[in-house]
Amino acid sequence: MKPFTRLDGLVAPLDRANVDTDAIIPKQFLKSIKRSGFGPNAFDEWRYLDRGEPGKPNHDRPLNPDFVLNQARYQGASVLLARENFGCGSSREHAPWALEDYGFRVIIAPSFADIFFNNCFKNGILPIVLPAETVDRLFRETAAVEGYALTVDLAGQTLTTPTGDVIPFEVDPERKHRLLNGLDDIGITLQYVDKVRAYEARRKGEAPWLFA
Amino acid sequence: MARTLYDKLWDAHVVHVEPDGTALIYIDRHLVHEVTSPQAFEGLRLAHRAPWRTASVLAVPDHNVPTAHREQGIADPVSRTQVETLDENCRAFGLTEFPMTDRRQGIVHVIGPEQGFTQPGMTVVCGDSHTSTHGAFGALAFGIGTSEVEHVLATQCLWQKKSKAMLVRVDGQLGPGVTAKDIALAVIGKIGTAGGTGHAVEFGGSAIRALSMEGRMTLCNMAIEAGARAGMVAVDEKTVEYLRGRPYAPQGEQFEQAAAYWRSFVSDPGVAYDAVLELDAAQIQPQVTWGTSPEMVVPVDGRVPDPASAPNEVKRSDWERALAYMGLAANTPMRDIPVDKVFIGSCTNSRIEDLREAAAVARRAVAQGRRVADNVKLAMVVPGSGLVKVQAEAEGLDRAFTAAGFEWRDPGCSMCLAMNADRLEPGERCASTSNRNFEGRQGQGGRTHLVSPAMAAAAAVYGHFVDVREVMS
Ligand code: SF4
């Protein structure tokens, strides 16, 4: 996994609640058996005016001028500002794959759906939960100031606004450690092989049918 | 100390705990389907890893399979590749799979319980959010992403933080024609789609005890739509009897030994939960969603709400956007909304009991000289598995449906998410027994209204939403 330490990133606002993973990456793209290349189809149904299909080139498709991420001022954004319950719905990890491939490394929202939140950490994306009022303020400032960017420091657990305001955020110590160092979960778990085997041996005695 | 059902499931599976409370928990059962697994198998290959315990895995293709003329194979080459990739991966890694042509094939969350593969006291995962379904058996069951699918294949474990425990207690008696689906929608309507976030939800109370295992599965299936990662119901004799004799359940003497263990998976009396929600079953009416999130729901005799009355600014713009997408005007009575298509199926409502309830409405219609209404272009019934289909046909449900003008299909996810050929066209409106009414869920531009199977069948016959209690009285 890509480590995440620090980022100076342009902020793009997506001002709607309950953005679901079907919207982040529509179902037809889930037919891919690969893990990459989903970025051009992130938010496909909102972003383009025609229907996207796997394998169809995206560069000449008509863009929806009303979709916020299509505005010139948000091109190159790497911080996504979102509303409550971001990433709800399907467990598809294609959603963080698509966001990461699009260029987002940080997502800020008042709340996230559990599975999506978890999937972000597996893909080098930092989801940050902030109080609704703080998120409101960031929406206002992003709208008001073209080129609004945040400095995200994972080690120090802070966001810094262009005017130098520092906003602290919480992150799970274990997740932080793994993200900072780009550690692979499977590699970590395999250090506990003996414990897993001991657990299995004990359970086989208590409940042998579990292993049938 | 008194423990909740969730505490007991958690405690029984902890292998190791990190100082910050992150735990490595052991996974007993791993269900696999074609959409979220290819990249996980690829990861195993690249790292030269093998599955830790092949007997813990059961795989099935369900999302991409056609529901008609299956013998002709899958027409869409991309869908076909995905299903063939699952077949190949299962062969290569020595995993049990029910391929598309197997009579036991079906939606992954239908076949796990049907085969007795899902059992009380287990941890059950799948790369699919509706894995919460299996919690109906007193199991800890939740959806995971593809990285975690690979992790479970490689290590039989997952890193987890313990959730909070919420009790949703539904006491009293459901009215006739009111089902588990209506309880689920009523709960989501009450707490919202993020109401259960960070919680494992246990459904309890006399109305839950009275539900069949099918009904409990419907309810736990929708726990994820309330934001809860897991839903669960305590074990009772219905749970035990459901499992007796199923192919993957313990047999003979071992069954009794297992059953004794299973019965311990109930919350201790008087235990405290982090949150409690209480509902009176008698107050729950048949529900219909009007918007693009399952929380946008009203009783069938209600109206489309007016965004002007929304509780806050974010909700107001959400409601406005939903009404625009759904092509609905504020204050329209739900009963006046006509439908173009009807879908009875999905892991929420495609089990035998669901089909019986819908077929009863179809039979009543035929007895009254009615059929599927002329304005309804397609009313399809998609059983949850090949075995559900066989059972339904043995009971004559297929003929009840076809006589009333419904199409009777082969099992799969079908129009629940429209990855196969079954889908809504832009602007089409559907009464659906599935679990998500998100924009584009059943086809780009499609408009979904979530309802129970009987309500869907009644909408098919009348061409618009009606109160199934009046139809059946
Ligand atoms: S029926 Fe629908 S919700 Fe259930 S597993 Fe299939 S696609 Fe997912």
Image (spheres, coloured by chain):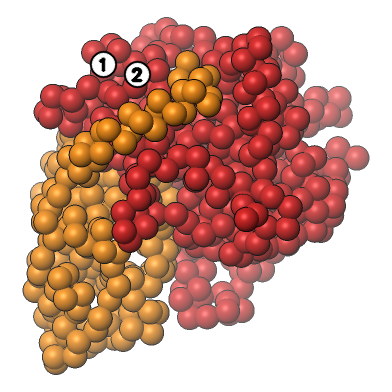
Chain colours: A orange, B red
Q: Nearer the viewer, mark 1 or mark 2?
A: 2
Q: Secondary structure at mark 2?
A: helix
On the question of residue B56 being in view, the answer is: yes
Residue wearing tag 2? B54
For label 1, being within 8 Å of ligand 1 is answered no
Q: Residue at (20%, 43%) from the top-left corner? A: A188
Q: Secondary structure at mark 1?
A: helix
Q: Is residue B40 above or below residue B224?
A: above
Q: Identify which residue, B203 or B267, lies in the foreground.
A: B267
Quadrant in the rendering for residue B280? bottom right
On the question of residue B82 being in view, the answer is: no
How far across and down, in percent of the image, does residue B106 sit? 50, 21
Q: Is residue B429 above or below residue B215?
A: below
Q: Identify which residue, B337 or A8, lies in the foreground.
A: A8
Q: Amino acid at mark 1?
A: Phe
Q: Judge the density around disc 1: few (<14), some (14-19), many (≥20) Cα neighbours within 10 Å.
A: some
Q: Amino acid at mark 2?
A: Thr
Cβ–Cβ under 8 Å for marks 1 and 2: yes
* Dots 1 and 2 on the same chain: yes
How far across and down, in percent of the image, does residue B320 sit? 49, 70
- Left or right for B406, reference B7: right
Chain under label 1?
A: B
Q: Residue at (14%, 92%) from the top-left corner? A: A163
Q: Identify which residue, B291 or B144, lies in the foreground.
A: B144
Chain under label 2?
A: B
- Tell me the tag on residue B93: 1
How far across and down, in percent of the image, does residue B246 sit? 62, 15
CA distance for labels 1 and 2: 8 Å
Quadrant in the rendering for residue B350? top right
